Image: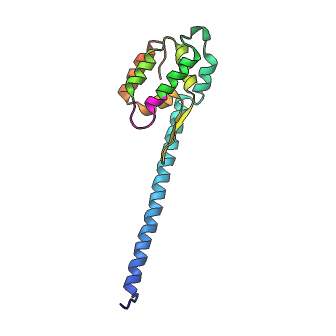
Amino acid sequence: MKNFSLNEDTLKKGLQVKEIIFYSAIGFVLIVGGIIAAKKFIFKKKEEETGESTTKEAGRIINKKNLSYDAIVYNAMADRLGEAMFDWGTDEKTIFEILSRLKTKDDWYALVNAFGTRKEPGLLIYFEGNLIQWLQHELSDSDLKKVNDILSKIGVTI
């Protein structure tokens, strides 16, 4: 059998490795915590900018006489928009197609109301918001301009 003895250098190296692992773990936790906190702050700011009661307002100001579709159609549109924006990648074509189907400002409000507030949980970070916030979160500036061009035809901008 080989004689194994711990000398002072071996002990110091072992402690150094443990310290490196310990401080690396603390650094990782702090970085992840900082990212989560920053995201929540940014999303809260966007929520304040777009009005946190957008969905509630939409439900109150809809003139049902001006609606082009039944409630089931708005719900289906909202679900398709959600599918177009959730997970990896964004299906801009579907978003433009759905928004192009809106004929009145009340159609827009009904769609916002049907979309409600949705959240997509992620591994470390999640996003939660109403339709306006989701569009702003998912689309590039040029795609948001296209959305506004489409919606301006019915008197809406986001």
Horizontal side, residue 87 vs residue 115: left or right = left
Residue 152 in picture, x, y percent from top left: 44, 15
Q: On the image, which quarter does residue 95 sit in?
A: top left
Classify 77 as above or below 37: above
> How many numbered discs sit on the rendered protein?
0
The furthest residue to the top: 65
Residue 127 in picture, x, y percent from top left: 50, 39
The quarter of the rendered structure image containing the N terminus is bottom left
The answer to whether residue 109 of the structure is visible from this angle is no
Q: Residue at x 43, y 77 (%)?
A: 15
Q: Residue at x 54, y 30 (%)?
A: 130
Q: On the image, which quarter does residue 70 sit in?
A: top right
Classify 95 as above or below 129: above
Residue 85 on the magenta span: yes
Residue 5 in picture, x, y percent from top left: 40, 89
Residue 142 on the magenta span: no
Horizontal side, residue 53 vs residue 29: left or right = right
The furthest residue to the right: 60
Question: What's the image's color scheme?
Answer: rainbow
The furthest residue to the front: 1
| Closer to the camera in the image, 10 or 4 | 4
Residue 109 in picture, x, y percent from top left: 55, 19
Classify 28 as above or below 132: below
Q: Residue at x 42, y 16 (%)?
A: 150
Horizontal side, residue 43 vs residue 60: left or right = left
Q: Residue at x 50, y 34 (%)?
A: 46
Residue numbers of the magenta segment: 82-90
The answer to whether residue 88 of the structure is visible from this angle is yes
